[in-house]
Amino acid sequence: MTENDNPRSWWPRRSPWRSLAWFTSGVLIMVAATSARELLDDPPGPAAQTGPAELVIYSGVDESTGGQRQKLIEEWNGLHPDTPARLVSLSRSADAQHSEMRATAQSDTPDADIYNLDTTWTAAFASAGFILPLAPTTDTNGFLAAPLETCKFGGKLWALPFNTDAGLLYYRTEVPASALPSALPPSANDVRALSGAVRGIEAGFVTPLDSYEGLTVSALEAIWAEGGEVYDAKNDLVVIDSQRTRAALRKLAQSMQPVDGVAPAVHPQALRLREDTSRETFRAGKVALMRNWPVAYSQLRAGDQPMTDFGVRTLPGPSVLGGQNLAVASSTDNPAAAQQLIAFLTSEDSELRLFRDGGLAATRTAAYTNPSVLSRQPYAPILKQALDNARPRPETTHYELFSSTFQEIVAQTLSNGGTLPDDAVARLTKALQGRLD
């Protein structure tokens, strides 16, 4: 990648005094880190100010309608000129975001004050010392229980939920309720009914199956729909070789093939599709049904040619719980102000605006009954139901290795007619232990 290709190459660095601080002796670094931790472990007091101190937030691309995250940042800056914030947008890919944030945290001159972490990264960033625990006095009232739980690790609260996510089933309005499948992937009979309702479709359903985190999500949901599991957390065992899990992966692989002249249940191109390209496949009328996150609802309805001929309902089976959480970076010079910014960005008013105006699923319970939200996002009760039934991905300090290994195994399985590799259990077990050998 050239400097011009690097989206961060032009960003201004911190002032020289801050960069110099990171090159002082190891003793001073430890003292600074300890002081920062004490500020968060105890109720934060007034922070000494020597001038404007910028707060840098590392985050994935803002996919909200109208850039609502940036608008909140601008409002904060107007209210807090002494601690203005700047949103640093990383890659759209969650895998790439993780790599960039980790590289920043491990660099000699980290400039991050806040990380917007995927819900699965809390354990890894906390155990590595990249983030600080929030103050015990942090107010967590009003948050949805499941998203808040993803902010905890080792008995401490490390973050607050910025936006949450649960998979939804999008369907074209030509599809009658009687033709909506009771399970996913759809059966051949389901696809026959869908083809009769929506002319010209190439497949019944699309879900992202490209080799990235979307494959982990889609595969887990397919496995859970068949009553299978991948990891037994209670007994700390990999159970991907169970009969039901094998059957689920075999069903997913076979669903991309036509049956007796009927279109495939899952679009064969799904192996190269992500959330955005799945959305456009659905918009183009190539499929009758789509699995996607809530933000797709506003994305489909936005733009010069908004799509209105679709509806949403909960998935027939459990959904993966998604979302992002805001955590204070251990590299910050101003942990108290960073936590105040997190509280502002996750406040009830901010969450209402992010959902109502931006389409990002709110982490606050009140948003799902708010009249202004319901007028703009009428599917809010359906989303709340999906969130109530959503399941988190396995918690592990080596989640990225676990997920990438799981993706490799699933991709092999799908390309081999649904036959699970013989070494699947051994490979996933090593990944959970952080081993590459």
Image (cartoon, helix red, strand yellow):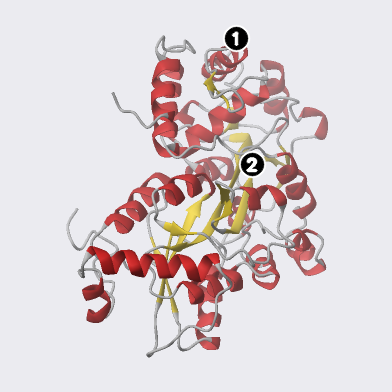
Nearest the viewer among 410 and 108 is 108
Secondary structure under the numbered disc 1 in the rendered image: helix
Percent x, y of residue 159:
55, 58
Q: Nearer the viewer, mark 1 or mark 2?
A: 1
The residues bearing labels 1 and 2 have C-alpha atoms spaced at a distance of: 25 Å
Percent x, y of residue 113:
41, 68
Instruction: Locate residue 197: give its quadrant.
Output: top right
Nearest the viewer among 154 and 118 is 154
For residue 367, say whether it is visible.
yes
- Tell me if 417 is positioned left or right of 175 in this view: left
| The furthest residue to the left | 2
Q: Is residue 69 above or below residue 235?
A: below
Q: Amino acid at mark 1?
A: Gln
Percent x, y of residue 76:
54, 80
Instruction: Locate residue 428: give its quadrant.
Output: top left
Q: Which residue is mark 2?
A: 167
Q: Which residue is mark 1?
A: 243
The quarter in which the C terminus is drawn is top left
Secondary structure under the numbered disc 2 in the rendered image: loop
Q: Indicate which disc, 1 or 2, sits on the residue closer to the N terminus.
A: 2
Residue at horizontal 47%, vertical 47%?
121
Q: Amino acid at mark 2?
A: Gly
